[in-house]
Image (spheres, helix red, strand yellow):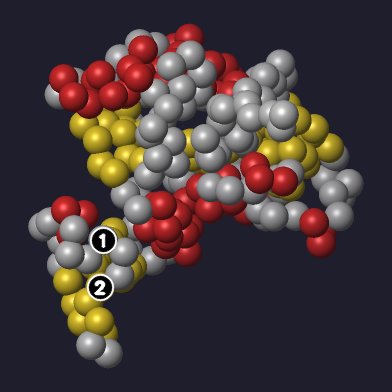
Amino acid sequence: MNKIFKNAKEATADIKEGVTIMFGGFGLCGIPENCIASLVEMKVSNLTCISNNAGVDDFGIGLMLHQKQVKKMISSYVGENAEFERQLLSGELEVELIPQGTLATRCMAAGYGLPAIYTPAGVGTEVANGKEIRSFNGKDYLLEMAFDADFALVKAWKGDTLGNLIFKGTARNFNPLMAMAGKITIAEVEELLPAGELDPNEIHTPGIYVNRIFKGENYEKRIENLTLSK
């Protein structure tokens, strides 16, 4: 099976209107910049996006929000995007806010083939509305369903032609979990190597989870809030 694609445009060409997509990254760290740029260019719309964040106004998923490509946003942190706030308050955008650990575990459950998980996070809050609650050893837990995503778009530091991935630093956040969870996982990498070149002990995501891989380019690696010491 040849997993190598020329670029993001080729790798994302069959992403159609109305699908559900996972986006790796935390804030602006480790986001699939090339894939997002391709989706913006394609103007594919009515998307359900699962991501830790909603980008910022001029970068990341924020670029898709400005083009009204996102129908529903499933996230845990959305505090840096004024356009997201405007669309939420105006009723233009469906939003499901999830505790961050629950978001990660629902990704993990999908990757492991589990239909659902039980978690104490959110019990007694609005997060619990309409959800099954069960008690284990005297403590209440919410039933949370595993995600069902058509695509997972992730960004890695290094990858090989078999799809094995290595993430660098804090880019090893939601990327490995989401790489496991998508029906079709597309990985963009800074460095693409022949099979056998990566140290097996350093691989974070085995290639069995990755369907498509390409070498990305022109990474901005934007910093969300630059803070300098005096």
Give the image quarter of residue 191. Answer: top right
Residue 55 lies, in percent from the top left, at 46, 27
Q: Nearer the viewer, residue 154 or 99?
A: 99
Circle count: 2
Residue 104, visible in the rendered structure = yes
Task: For mark 2, give the secondary structure.
Answer: strand
- Vertical position of residue 3 compared to residue 220: above or below: below
Q: Nearer the viewer, mark 1 or mark 2?
A: 1
Give the image quarter of residue 141. Answer: bottom left
Residue 27 lies, in percent from the top left, at 52, 35
For residue 122, the mark is: 1
- Specify the farthest residue to the front: 230
Residue beneath the point at 27% across and 90% down: 137
Quadrant (top left, top right, bottom left, bottom right) of the N terminus: top right
Quadrant (top left, top right, bottom left, bottom right) of the C terminus: top right
Residue beneath the point at 17% across and 64% down: 124
Left or right placement of residue 130 versus residue 55 in this view: left
- Vertical position of residue 164 compared to residue 13: above or below: below
Q: Earlier in the sequence, mark 1 or mark 2?
A: 1
Give the amino acid at mark 2.
Tyr
- Vertical position of residue 148 compared to residue 217: above or below: below
Residue beneath the point at 25% across and 19% down: 86
Q: Gap in Å between the C-alphas at discs 1 and 2?
A: 8 Å
Left or right placement of residue 88 versus residue 211 in this view: left
Give the amino acid at mark 1.
Gly
Residue beneath the point at 75% across and 55% down: 203
Q: Which residue is mark 2?
A: 141
Q: Nearer the viewer, residue 227 or 83?
A: 227
Residue 202 lies, in percent from the top left, at 80, 56
Task: For mark 1, give the secondary structure.
Answer: loop
